[in-house]
Structure formats: C-alpha cells, structure tokens
Image: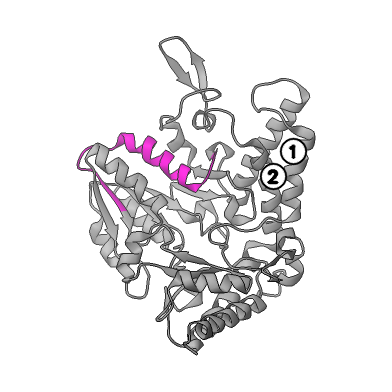
Amino acid sequence: MNATATQPVIRPVRLAERFPILQRTVRGRRLVYLDNAATTQKPQEVLEALTRFYTHTNANVHRGVHTLAEEATAAYEHCRERVAQFLRAPDPRGVVILRNATEAINLVARSWGRKLQAGDEIITSEMEHHSNLVPWIMLARERGLSLKHIPITDQGELDLAAYRKLLSRRTRVVAVTGMSNVLGTIVPVAEIAEEAHKVGAVVVVDGAQLVPHEPVRFDELGCDFLAFSAHKMYGPTGVGFLVAKPELLEAMEPIFGGGEMIREVHLDRASWNDIPHKFEAGTPNIADAAAFPAALSLVEELTPQAIRAHERDLTAYAWEKLQSLGGLTLHGPADPQRRGALISFVDEHIHPHDLATVLDTYGVAIRAGHHCAQPLMRRLGVVATARASFAVYNSREDVDALIFGLLAARKYFGLA
C-alpha cells in the first residue's frame, strides 16, 4: 500500500528531524517511539508556536479590548476555525474547545443526557475506551437508563447484525469509537449512524484514534457529535474538541457555569452565551489552542491520505514481522485496510509489562497494560497487552528495532 502518485511521499527519517525529542537517546540508544496512541511527539513548529504565544501574545480572551487581548482572542478563534476547516465541519460555531476528547464526551453525556428519561437506551460497544463507557455508565445510573453494548466478533470487528438487533424505539444515543485503541479496528461509523438515525438516536463518535490517522470529513462521517484530542495528532496536551451540528449544541444546556459562558447574570438568574461559548466557562487553554493549528498544518502538508498510506504500510510490515516470530497473539483484524496504525499483541511466555521494560532498555517505547479498556481485555481473555502504535515519523527501521528488542527479551528470559 503505497501513496499514489498524486500524494506526497512521506519520508519518516527526514520528517523525524522536525521533532526535537526524537533526536534524543534513551539508555544510550536511539529513541524509537512507538507509543503514539497514547500521545504523539510535537514538531518544532508547534513548540515555536507555543513559545511565540507566551512571548508575544499572552493575554486572556474574549474580555479585554487592548491589543494583546485582541490578538490572543484572534489566535484562539483561529484554532476553532482551523478545526472546522480541517474536518469540513459545517460551521465553526459547532466546534467547542475543551481539554480533551474525554471532556467532550462527558459534555454530551451530561448535557444531551438531560433529555433522556428512565427506560431510554444507550448503545456503546465492547471495544470502547473507558472515556466512552464511564460517562454513559454514570448517566445511566443517575437517570435509570438502559445500557446496551455491541459485541465484537472473533476477528475484532463490531458485530453489525447484533447492533441492528439492539436498536429499538427507545434508543436515544449510540456512542462508538471511530477506531479501537486496542484492536486498531476502524469502525464503519457512517453505516452505524445511518441505522441509529432511523430510530431517532444521536450518534457520538470517540475520534481520538481516528482523526489523527484517517482522512475524516465530519459531514461524511454521518455522526452528530465527534470528539478528539490535539495531543494525539502532534499538538499540545490539554486541548480537545467537540465537533457537532450547531442546532444540536443550540438545544443543549451548559454543564459548567462561570465567566464567559453567560449573556446576562442577576443575583438569582442567568442566561447563556451563544454557542459554542456557553460551553467554555472560565479561562480556556489559550496558548495550547493557539499552537494547535501548526500541527494541523503539518498534517495538511503531508495530507491525511498520504499519512494513512504510510501508516498502513508500516502496520502491515509490523504485522508480518510480528507474526513471523511465532508465540505471539496479535489482536484485531489482520487486513490492514480494516485497521489503523497500531498493533496489540501478547507473548505467550512474557508479561506485557516485562516486555515493555526490556524494550525500554533498547530505547524502544511501547505501551503495556489494559489501555483503559478493561471490558475489552475481559472479552479477549487477557489482563493486558503490549501495544506498538505508529505515527508519520516512524519507519520500517523502527519496526525492526521493535523486533530486535522482542528477540532480546526472549533471550533475557531464557526463551531463545
């Protein structure tokens, strides 16, 4: 799977030069960073944008009339406009700037959830991150709602036939991931949304893993709410987004009260600001929002299509290499066209934590654990997995370093 002739060719080694942290060593070896599903590294242009804001622009937004305040407000609103433009969202007013994808999903659960009544149903799935499970569990407890879950097949994909049977006239919300952070499975969101809308349900998509790795257009996704975080796509931590149809945000009540989110306040009553500001109480994370457009520009420069092609090539290469070792269980779809840029695996003799520790001694950073997906771990019959996840700056040499480290771990534990 190579990029087509019309797409830029991603040269990961040269690209890595734009990420200062990738120039460092770990335990005397070249850093091989394969924990990108947790957070990506930041290019020089994002670091410079962050420094530039604090050096030249720092002020609060939407309040002052002095030059710095106006420039800060412009930088903050530019982030909103760039996100809307990047995702082809219908209106920047439908972009709420929050701390992360988790907060975005919680906002929908706490605000849209007020419309639900006892006996109404929410559908999620077995492959959800806790961020797209716990908010709905909390809401269901409080309001007497019914939770249903789409099962996964043995191939690690959602069972769509079972999903259609779960839908009913009481279904009010369908909340699914766009791409599993454990299985790598790419979920057919548009198909799920079409079915959900037939019964009048709104569709919430956890796009934390999807948006950084796949070409995503909000209008083509077909969902009503899309949540994602900046830090998983080369931007700063502490900034996330809820992208929604403006008319849905108009129909929702704020969940945090305070400054900026109001239109008028009396001692005993208040009215709310226009969208999206009524959901952004208090001083927001201005500097990091101002820096995020630099990350979006990087993605646009490379193009999402070329990023997908590069990462799928890398994932397919890693899958083949890992499978050739033997003694490993690889989770998720084997078809690289049906999965994103990560692979979770379990060595039959080495605990994932031990494996990750040994790999670290070779400068290779992977994730080990339940990945905030404990129900999925139970479904898979494991307590943890090792996970290697890729980004634009990763190369086949990085995969080779992973394989070298795995063989070294087996030797260390007397297995080879």
From the top left corner, tell me how far across and down residue 264 is, in percent: 50, 15
- Helix, strand or loop at mark 1: helix
- Left/right of residue 5 with respect to residue 357 in the rendered view: right
**Is 275 located above or below residue 243 in the figure?**
above
142 within the magenta span: no
From the top left corner, tell me how far across and down residue 83 is, in percent: 61, 46
The boundaries of the magenta stretch are 96-123
121 within the magenta span: yes
**Is 14 located above or below residue 268 in the figure?**
below
Q: Residue at x 74, y 36 (%)?
A: 54
Q: Which residue is mark 1?
A: 53
For the residues labelled 1 and 2, the Cα–Cα distance comes to: 8 Å
Outermost residue toward the left in this view: 119
Cβ atoms under marks 1 and 2 closer than 8 Å: yes
In this view, the residue in front, 122 or 357, is 357
- Helix, strand or loop at mark 2: helix
Q: Look at the image and tell me whether residue 9 can be seen.
A: no
- Amino acid type of the residue that numbered disc 2 sits on in the rendered structure: Ala
Could you classify mark 2 by the number of other residues whose Cα lies within 10 Å: few (under 14), some (14-19), or many (20 or more)?
many
Q: Look at the image and tell me whether residue 132 can be seen.
A: yes
Q: Of marks 1 and 2, which one's residue comes earlier in the chain?
A: 1
In this view, the residue in front, 41 or 411, is 411
Could you classify mark 1 by the number of other residues whose Cα lies within 10 Å: few (under 14), some (14-19), or many (20 or more)?
some
**Is 138 located above or below residue 198 in the figure?**
above
- Amino acid type of the residue that numbered disc 1 sits on in the rendered structure: Phe
In this view, the residue in front, 29 or 319, is 29
Q: Which residue is mark 2?
A: 291
Q: Residue at x 45, y 79 (%)?
A: 334
Q: Residue at x 62, y 51 (%)?
A: 86
From the top left corner, tell me how far across and down residue 202 is, in percent: 36, 46
From the top left corner, tell me how far across and down residue 296 is, in percent: 66, 52
